[in-house]
Amino acid sequence: MNASATSLAGLAIAPEEFVRRRRQLMRMAGHDAVLLVAAAPERMRNADAAWPYRQNSDFQYLAGFPEPDAVLALLPGRAHGEAVLFCRERDPEHERWHGQSVGTERAVSAWGMDDAFPIDDIDDILPGMIEGRARVYCHFGHEPAFDAQLLGWMRRLRQLRGGGVVPKEFVALGHLLHDLRLFKSRAELKLMRASAAIAVEAQLAALRLARPGRHEYEVEAELLGTMRRHGAVPAFAPTVAGGANACVMHYQGNRAPLREGELLLIDAGAELDCYASDISRTFPPNGRYSREQRALYEVVLAAQLAAIDQVRPGLPFNASHDAAVRVLSEGLCALGLLDGGADEAIASGSYRRFFAAKTGHWLGLDVHDVGDYRIDGESRLLEPGMVLTVEPGLYIAADDRTVAEHWRGIGIRIEDDVAVTREGHEVLTEAMPKDADQIEALLAGR
C-alpha cells in the first residue's frame, strides 16, 4: 500500500459496525445488566497546556466518539433505546475557543446512538436508568473521578423513598469486552494495514537520513514528520537507539550522536484513527554491517522468520516465542557466546542474558493490546483475526566482560506486525526490508 494515497475518510469504521459491537457486548452481559464506559479525560501536560487528546480505547471501540466529557451507557432491553450517550451540548462560546462539538443531536444522527443527553444532566438521568438492573459492568479503578461519580449514583439510589433497587454486583467490563477487541474485523484490519504502511514509510525515511554524525533526535524528527504528513500520530514514543543504547529495551533518550561503526535500532509505530502499528529495524548508518554485527543480525533474522512461521490458526501463542528462543540459542552457541548446546541454554535459561524479553504481544487499538495470553493456564491458541507482533532480539551490554570486546554494545531487534488468517498469516509490515543485503543496498542508494 502506498501510504501517501491513504485517505482516512475511506478507512473509517462505519457506524453500523459500532452498533454491532455494542449489541454483541450487551448479549454477552445479559438483559439485567447495565454497561458503563467513560471517555478518556483531557490530560494536562503542564500548567494549563493539555496533551493532544486521545480517546479511551474501549470507548473508541464501542462508540468511535472523539470527545472527552462523555459516558456511554448500554442498557439491554431499554424500550427507548439501548445505547445512550451523555456528551457535551453544542455551546457557541466553548466552540469559539475549542472548535465545534458533536452535540446530542449528531450523536444520534451521525454516531448511531439510540439516545443522547447532555453530560451536565447525567446525575439526574442515569441513576434512574441504572435502577432495577442486577449488575453494573464498568472499569472500576481506572479513573478516580468517574469511580466517585458512580458511587454517588449508587448512594442516590439507596436513599430513594422506599429504597431504590440497587445493582448487587459490580463486574469488570474487560472480562467481556477485551475478548471482543482481540478479534479484528475487516475494517479494523484495513486500518491496521494503512497504519503499517505509514510506519514503513517512516522507517524508510529514517533509514535514508541516518548517517554517522547525525543525532538520534534528528532521526526521530524524520519518523514523526513522516507520520504526521500521512495523517497519523506516533503510537508510542519512538526508540531511536544508536550503539549500546540499543541494549536498553525501552530507550527513549534519543539525544546521542550516531557514531561510525555502530548500529542504529529504531522501534516506532504509527497510530491511525486509534489503530497502532509497531516496527523495529536495526541497521548500520555507515552503510555496512561489521562481521560481528552481521553474524548476530543473521541469527536474529533467522529467529524472527522461524517465529513468524509459527503464527498460524490452532498453534499456541507462545509457539513463536519458543521457536525464536531455539534459533537464538543455537546461534549464540555457534558463535561461542554461550557454552554448551542449545538444549542446555534453553533448559538453564542462560540465553536470557542476551534475550530477556518475550517475542511478541497483541496489537490493535493499543500497542500492547488487550486479550488474554493464557486460557486455563495454557497458552492461548491463535485464531483468525488476531494480530500480534513478532520481535526477537539480541542485546549484549557494553560492560559485559564475559564476551570478547568486539561483541559488546551490540543491540539488535527485528519486529513485524502479523495478522492470523484462515490460511496462516499476513505480515502487515512486510514492505519494510529486513534482509541484511537488502538493507545495505538501500543504504548504498541514499
Image (cartoon, grey):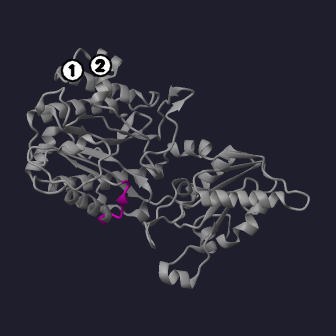
In depth, the one of 180 and 171 nearer the eye is 171
In the image, taking residue 166 as reference, residue 200 lies left or right, namely left
Q: Secondary structure at mark 1?
A: helix
The residue that disc 1 covers is: 333
Range shown magenta: 229-236
Q: Amino acid at mark 2?
A: Ala
Q: Is 78 located above or below residue 358 in the figure?
A: below
User: Percent position (x, y) of residue 398?
Assistant: 19, 37
Q: Position of residue 89 (x, y in %)?
A: 62, 76
Relative image position of residue 295 (x, y in whole percent): 15, 31
Q: Name the residue located 75 percent from the left edge and 67 percent from the top edge.
A: 125
Judge by depth and name the residue closer to the eye, 340 or 24: 340
- Lateral position of residue 331 relative to residue 194, left or right: left
- Circles 1 and 2 in contact, beta carbons < 8 Å: yes
The image quarter in which residue 156 lies: bottom right
The residue indicated by pointer 2 is 345
Q: Quadrant of residue 312?
A: top left
Q: How many residues crowd around disc 1 within 10 Å: few (fewer than 14), some, or many (20 or more)?
A: some
Q: What amino acid is found at the position of numbered circle 1 in the picture?
A: Cys
Distance in Å between CA atoms under marks 1 and 2: 8 Å
Q: Residue at x 9, y 37 (%)?
A: 290
